[in-house]
Amino acid sequence: MPKHSSGHPDALGPVAKGVPEKLRRTKHEAPAKPGVVETAAAPKPEFSFTLKPADIARYLGRFVIGQQEAKKVLSVALCDHFQHVRMTLEGQAAPYYQKQNVMLLGPTGVGKTHLIRSAAELIGVPFVKADATKFSETGYVGGDVDDLVRDLIRRAGGDVKKAGHGIIYLDEVDKLATRGESGGRDVSGRGVQTNLLKLMEDGDVPVVSPNDMSGQLHSAMAVMRGGGGLQADTINTRHILFIVSGAFSGMTEIIRRRTENLNSRKTENEDALISRTTTADLIAYGLEPEFIGRLPVRVACHGLNADDLFEVLRRSESSLIHQYERAFAAYGIACTFADDGLRELAKLAATEQTGARGLMTICERVFRDFKFKLPGSRVKRFVVSARMVREPAHELRRLLGGKKSRTSH
């Protein structure tokens, strides 16, 4: 029997035998003082939020390079919203608070989704992302916007209260624009915008979809078993933050027409123009005024040039090069990237005009044969240089040719 230097009951050995387990003190429990009533530990708060805008912006900077204005605006909006949620749950009601839903504008591949996903992970709230194009007006074939909220409940592990202060991110919202008159019933543009109105402000959504027969049956069985009262029938969206985004292709032409008589600088580039988007421009693009009105916080993300893409590869904690290092390491091959190799990859990716997504396109093209031929070869190490990016076939033959070079050892 092990010796015990403490006063723990187990130190008594046989004396402790026969004492009910629930009455034994653990090593970390202090004995109750005579005359003092023991109280339970303070309950864990329903929702805790102590971050400041600078904290969020600093965290986002680890994953998304550039986009400083977007980080600042998003960080302030997130702090305002979740501080309001925290204070409301603590009993400090604000009946006239207006939710600061966010709209992000900018071309594809500039980090819009990455910004929102990273922020949700930092704050620790459920996060759902969906494309606006998959929804249709209720009653027609296609997704129902209420399903976004139900997906949030699933992401929260079925916890309706936790889902009630999550984040819903709707991408490609520009595809809901309805420019021009249509003779038929619009089921995927104006109708979806209208259905989103109640969700973005303050609406109640059934936890189980009326069209989900399996879910309805499960709920009915839970009620019969006496567990129906444990789960709310609806979830309120008052504290759910909605963030939408889109590339808004063609928006710059609308802005140019609006500003051509206002001494606008004709040489303004696309980034400068998109940052001047107004409510009138969004309405002219085809979005409903009521829909735009529920998105008071708007910020534009700029496109990424070759220098930006080089920094993405070199500095971001989620850089694509880590994925390739891992892929080769699985076969016992050490792959390292020289700065000139990263810069060459960035230059080629910039020509794709798809932002950071172009990096994957270029890398797959460059390293396709390396992934196929190097596993199982005697090459155990190589460095990705600018020459290798420009002439991958030649460099691969050199690696496999048996020559002992600096890059293969």
Image (tube, grey):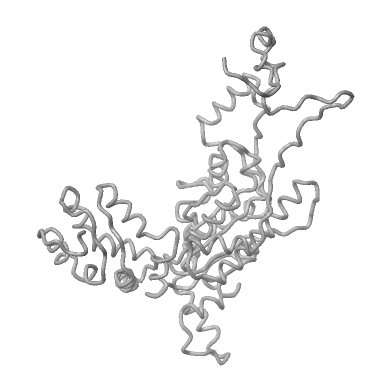
Q: 118 left or right of 88?
A: left
Q: Position of residue 209 (x, y in %)?
A: 55, 38
Residue 180 in view: no
Name which quarter of the figure residue 221 lies in.
top right
Give the residue drawn at x 50%, y 59%. Answer: 189
Residue at the right extreme of this rendering: 35
Give the residue drawn at x 29%, y 69%. Answer: 341
Camera-nearest residue between 101 and 136: 101
Q: Is residue 320 above or below residue 227?
A: below
| Figure quadrant of the C terminus | bottom left
| Figure quadrant of the N terminus | top right
Residue 112 in view: yes
Q: Position of residue 107 (x, y in %)?
A: 44, 69
Q: Position of residue 132 (x, y in %)?
A: 48, 56
Residue at the bottom extreme of this rendering: 263
Q: 274 left or right of 26?
A: left
Q: Is residue 145 above or below residue 391?
A: above
Camera-nearest residue between 203 and 83: 83
Name which quarter of the figure residue 197 lies in.
bottom right
Give the residue drawn at x 46%, y 62%. Answer: 175
Residue at the left extreme of this rendering: 401
Camera-nearest residue between 45 and 8: 8
Give the residue drawn at x 56%, y 44%. Answer: 152
Q: Position of residue 22 (x, y in %)?
A: 69, 16
Q: 326 left or right of 1?
A: left
